Image (tube, coloured by chain):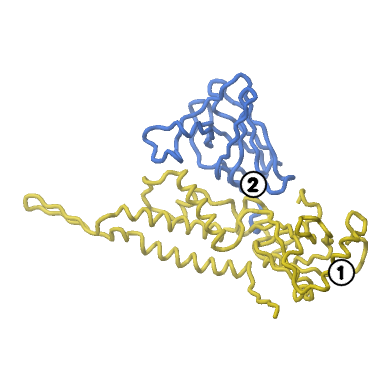
Amino acid sequence: MRINAKIIKNVADVNQWEYANVAYVQEGQSNEIYIQLVDLDKTHSAEKSTALPEFPLRYMPQGTVVTLTATFPNIDSDEQFTITGAQPFADDKSIWRLPLTATDIPASGNFIITLTEDGVEKTFLIRNALSVELVNVGGC
Amino acid sequence: MADFPESKGFGTKAYPVEALKTTPLLRRCEPMLTADLLKSRYLKGIDFDKYTDPELEQEIEIATNEFELMSNLTVNKVIFKERIPFDRAAYQAFVFMKLNNGPIRTIDELIIESSNGEEIYRLPPDWIEVGLAHKRQINLIPILSIFGAAGLKDGQASNAGLIFIQAVNNFRWLPAFYSVTYTGGLSNTDGEVPIVVNDIIGMTAAIEILSALQTNFLYNSTSISQDGITQSASGQGPQTFQARIEKLMERREKMLKRLRAEFHQKYYMSNI
């Protein structure tokens, strides 16, 4: 079992959402990232790659107490931060919402998810899943 | 840098090189390349049924690593620790040091360290000259308007350290003397990269993808005939994307060469 997550967007309810390659976050406003937990080892037979499946099956977290946190890495420990996810829909526990305030500005690239199911932690990396659009782009 | 309270940088942007202030009027930096951008910029009109988006993301990752190796530049910030020899010629040139990785954003720590890892003497950040750090050069220039107790470790003179420093007067060369901890990267903001870097990464990924895709075109020409009716078609076969690949390679080499010139300098120094 390889638990991971896919970015989803335009989330209205458990039946209305779309897959996205990256979550776009804009500086200067609050943002929301939606993810769907998936099991990379459980795929449709039509998948072209079993190593990197495009649409793996969703994963429903097990346990009575389930929490999820997202850590946005940065080389400067002052800039790194962790936020707690929320399950917006009781009917689909694979979908999580990660709220970012206007001052939460992560770095573009990978980020880390820690899923805790009744005290058992599962940590994984979502690759190149975040694209942060900054305001001052004249230099870096 | 939170982990290194005495970090010293020059206060300029990583890109454009030596820029002190920029405006958003022209975009020069952007987030790392994504699969969507790769398709839109370099692979327009290409049939992608052989590649999935996670596979394209993987190609970008590989191309980014290749770029780091080809250019000897670090895309995102990395903290390095490097041993520098004591070289009398360099010592007399204001302790000229050329580091292996870059472009350097900050010097986080500069110490004289023994071979068993013991810190002998911590050099004060005030003495470190970082104006050419983007080209990996640093110097120690202890000519300041105020000489204070900056050179002391924790406010105490380190006698052992001073003896060690005096002892080096007898050496022309010590293979490991200084230890420099520094942060290198192509941007002051983690996750942002110069657009030209994304361009090189994108071209590298596109070259690989196109060269893999063109192997699917097995034949240069095909013809079918039945009952006196024929149809034939010809193309470039396994060379279908060759012209595009060569153009991308040529442009990538030009860009890479120019980028290296921005962040490297050649120098020769020896002891006879």
Q: Colour of chain A?
A: blue
Q: Position of residue A79 (x, y in %)?
A: 72, 45
Q: Position of residue B56 (x, y in %)?
A: 46, 48
- Please give the chain letter of the residue carrying mark 1: B
Residue at 54% x, 27% y is: A94
Of all residues shown, which one is farthest toward the left? Answer: B227
Q: Amino acid at mark 2?
A: Ala
Q: Secondary structure at mark 2?
A: loop
* Viewer-side label of 2, 1: 1
Q: Colour of chain B?
A: yellow
Residue at 62% x, 24% y is: A66
Q: Nearer the viewer, residue B165 or B154?
A: B165
Tags 2 and 1 both on a single chain:
no
Q: Is residue B150 visible?
A: no
Q: Which residue is mark 2?
A: A107
Q: Position of residue B227 (x, y in %)?
A: 6, 50
Distance in Å between CA atoms under marks 2 and 1: 46 Å
Against A76, residue B107 (above or below) is below
Q: Which residue is mark 1?
A: B166
Q: Is residue B159 visible?
A: yes
Residue at 76% x, 49% y is: B3
Against B69, residue B191 (above or below) is above
